[in-house]
Image (cartoon, rainbow, N blue to C red):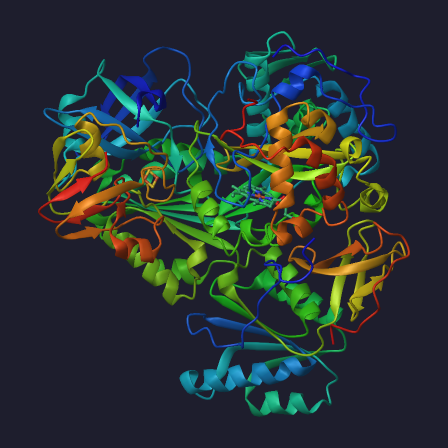
Amino acid sequence: MLITGIKSKPVYAPLQTDTRGRYHLMLAMGAGAAPLLRVIAEMRVVAGPSLKNTRVLFVSDAAAPEVEQFKAATVADLQTFPSTPALLERFRAILQKSLMGTRLYVAGPESFIGLAMKIALEFNLNKDEIRAEECGTLARRVYCIHCRATTEDVRTNIVSCIGCGRWLLVRDHYSRRLAAYMGVMVDAEAPGELPPLKEVFL
Amino acid sequence: MSAVFKPEETFRGDFNYSNSPQAVRRFPLPFAEDNYMYSVNIEPHLPGPLGSVTEFAFDVDEHYVAECRERAIVLATEPLRYQAMPHMMSSQWDCLELIMESLAHDYPAHFSLAKQGNRWHWINRPLEIDQHFTFGDTATLPREPLDYITRQAQGDFVVMDQREGDLWCEAGMVTTQADWSLDFDLGMTFKEWHGPVPLAHELQVFDRALKFLLNLRLGQPVRRLNWTMTINPRLDTSPENYPQWGTDRAAVTAQNAGDLVHLRVELQGLWRLPRSNAVVFGIRCYLISLRQLATVPKWARRVHRVLKDLHPALVDYKGLTRYRDAAVQWLAPFDDGSPTTSGTAPE
Amino acid sequence: MNDAQTITVEVIGVEQVTPLIKHFKLAPAAGGSLPVFSGGSHIIVVMQGAGRVHKNPYSLLGSPLALDTYEIGVRRMEESRGGSHFMHDAVEVGSRLEIAHPVNLFGLDKIARKHVLIAGGIGITPFLAQLEDLHGGSVPYELHYSVRSSEHAAFLQRLQRREGERLHVYYDSEGQTIAFETLLATQPLGTHVYVCGPVGMIKHVIATAQSCGWPDSHIHWEQFSAPPVGDAFEVFLARSKLSVHVPPDQSLLESIEAAGVEVPYLCRGGVCGFCHTRVLELDGELVHNDHFLSEADKAKAKSIMPCVSRANCKRLVLDL
Ligand code: HEM
Ligand code: FES
């Protein structure tokens, strides 16, 4: 069974402006603010000082220094959210009213990117409408193939499933629909034989 | 082949399963040579010789009734082994039509289909089913069309939508698989769901296969063979139930390998579907123990050589690591080193 | 196309629907039914013309579920490969034609949240069948149909009857044009646009959609995988000991077939690899149009995919 080097694992690239887009919807969490600020600076070279078609949704407390930086970058429409679910709810409401020509930029930990992409999929946003840059923790969402529970924030090579308690081996096989990696019972062939627990997704 | 069904067979528990001598003779050995590596092994799905597994579009053999019962057992506790996304409904009807028409045409003694416009009458004698329904109207069937018809067919089925120059795995009935999960792979593209396969991406097998399938023509189905090994004649070697079958792999020894280790061959057929322009992938699984396989001397020699020299990445991927050596040892006495003729037919 | 894969049909109806367009109804000559198809499909019609065989693609425009007939609309093309003239001048009720199984290169996106269909003139044909699929569904759609004048508006009554407010017709003769910019700038996320019509219109729709920010994956246009035309050349088939002339408007594969030599094929579109043929001698260059051979193989010029590829040379010898 292949564990690493699986081609379904998403590959991210540094964010770049998609100059063909007409509306730019940007989501960030934590360290994801930096790539967005970089893109916004890039866009201003082309668009001039006003970025009226650009919106930023940011998971952070309102007093975070990045908020000032976004304001200084003259983003007209900046909203902050206390949590990822709160941001995603707003994101969904915005997509309901968005027009063709919208580009999505997501920056943050992979689990954050995955959850945003999962919603974007429901609105039939294709690969050529979404850009994502991974920054921050590599902690994974892991879908237990045996009991179908998703364990969040997994940093180790094996993890005890939040649903069934089995020790799962975390494979690189990734589902965009589930926004999760596959977890498979690690000692199914030799019960009790566990590899050493290692922090690998930091 | 007018098979005599063996309804008492089981694919779990006591594993009451074997192949009749006729079934051994028609077993689709996937090795035309003494070695094996991935390739774009696709050929037109044209009718094969009388009695062969490719004589008809869908092969119905002596295990038919028992395999349908096995599927029902799996679904009773795990309904998500069947899934279909909402936009796949027209492809579901396409699949139902393809399977019903093929079975009724090829096995008139067992199945019949009568149509009056959209009013269809389907009879499946081996499973004692007699169903009147309106084609295109889901409410007239007890289940969704794909669910309904694949419960009456051997092998797994996956249906792919075609868009954005790719194939998307968006419906399927998968209860007899070799360690992959429809629930996990649903919604993936061709290269994503093939992600776990080693070497083949680098050999450009998937680039070429995808290009080929995107151009698959109506009325010109194709097929290929794939293989792995399974301990016991177990059809449901799903990742979902790995906790139940994983330990089997550790139980193999050079003494019991002949009875425990089974060659598992998948006859995979691909059809373009007319209404939906989707593609259906049928994965028909054949199991044979090494002991039964060795009744054909050429096959024993060949499988011994293939297994002995199999690329380590394939040994690992196919899950053979724990018992490959035992299987090779068990087969060794059948291999006197004499040459094998090319092709798969017994000598 | 070998015999097993074509269907003989008889023309059971011909109607001049506009000054340039004829509408043909085809029924299976042997009785029975025709294959079901999906909206947007076309068939290759094989015509035994004087001295040569024409193989032209035409969109199927009837209901995909009416299995007793296929319907096609044929516009008389000024500079055609000859097939449309043959259909207009030589085909009448009772004529027999060979057709291949339908192929769909212009399917609707099944997960679109809305469809915008744009047709110019004869470009309406693929949409007629797609509308049958869309009609009963829950996904919103609209059709914009641009024609020269009312006498050129083929199938208009049929459309008006079924589509009502979803149909928008524009007459060139009255100076009406589709406001592409407004149309494409105001579509909800998840919309797909489909265009079929004159090349200029297709290019304009693509450019406008792109300038409104549409990504390519949401823009679709009808595009036949017909083999590209090129200069005429001669080929010698070594095993058959035959010299074959390949005219500009016939593919290498068609020309070889016309000489009575069978070449295995599956896609006739340069992807499947079935028609792969070894090149034994060449004194010029090959024009590779396939997606099968690697760049390295193409550079070696030791093999060719005759379904789509050609040559610029004096002498080409193939292992056939
Ligand atoms: C379009 C229909 C097809 C479907 C739905 C399909 C599905 C799958 C799946 C689910 C796997 C297992 C992946 C895993 O380990 O998670 C697999 C393996 C594989 N597939 Fe496909 N496949 C299709 C067509 C093809 C074609 C046309 C080829 C042509 C070469 C191919 C070659 C392979 C190979 C080489 C493997 C590895 C098998 C092994 O070593 O056991 N597949 N396929
Ligand atoms: S026929 Fe498929 S590549 Fe030529």
Image coordinates of residue B94 in percent, x first then y, are: 55, 29
Give the tally of numbered discs: 0
Instruction: Decide which of C310, A105 is in the foreground and name it.
Output: C310
Residue C176 visible to an observer of this rendering? no
Image coordinates of residue C288 in percent, x first then y, are: 25, 51
Indicate the quadrant containing the C terminus of chain B: top left, top right, bottom left or bottom right. Answer: top right
Residue A93 visible to an observer of this rendering? yes
Image coordinates of residue A192 in percent, x first then y, are: 91, 56
Left or right of B260, for residue C150: left
Q: Residue at x 64, y 42 (%)?
A: B307
Left or right of C21, for residue A10: right
Q: In the displayed image of the protein, which residue is found farthest to the top?
A: B109
Locate residue A12: give its quadrant: bottom right
Image coordinates of residue C233 in percent, x first then y, are: 11, 43
Instruction: Decide which of B78, C240 is in the foreground and name it.
Output: C240
Locate residue B81: give its quadrant: top right
Instruction: Decide which of B65, B139 is in the foreground and name it.
Output: B65
Residue B18 vs C192, above or below: the answer is: above
Indicate the quadrant containing the N terminus of chain B: top left, top right, bottom left or bottom right. Answer: top right
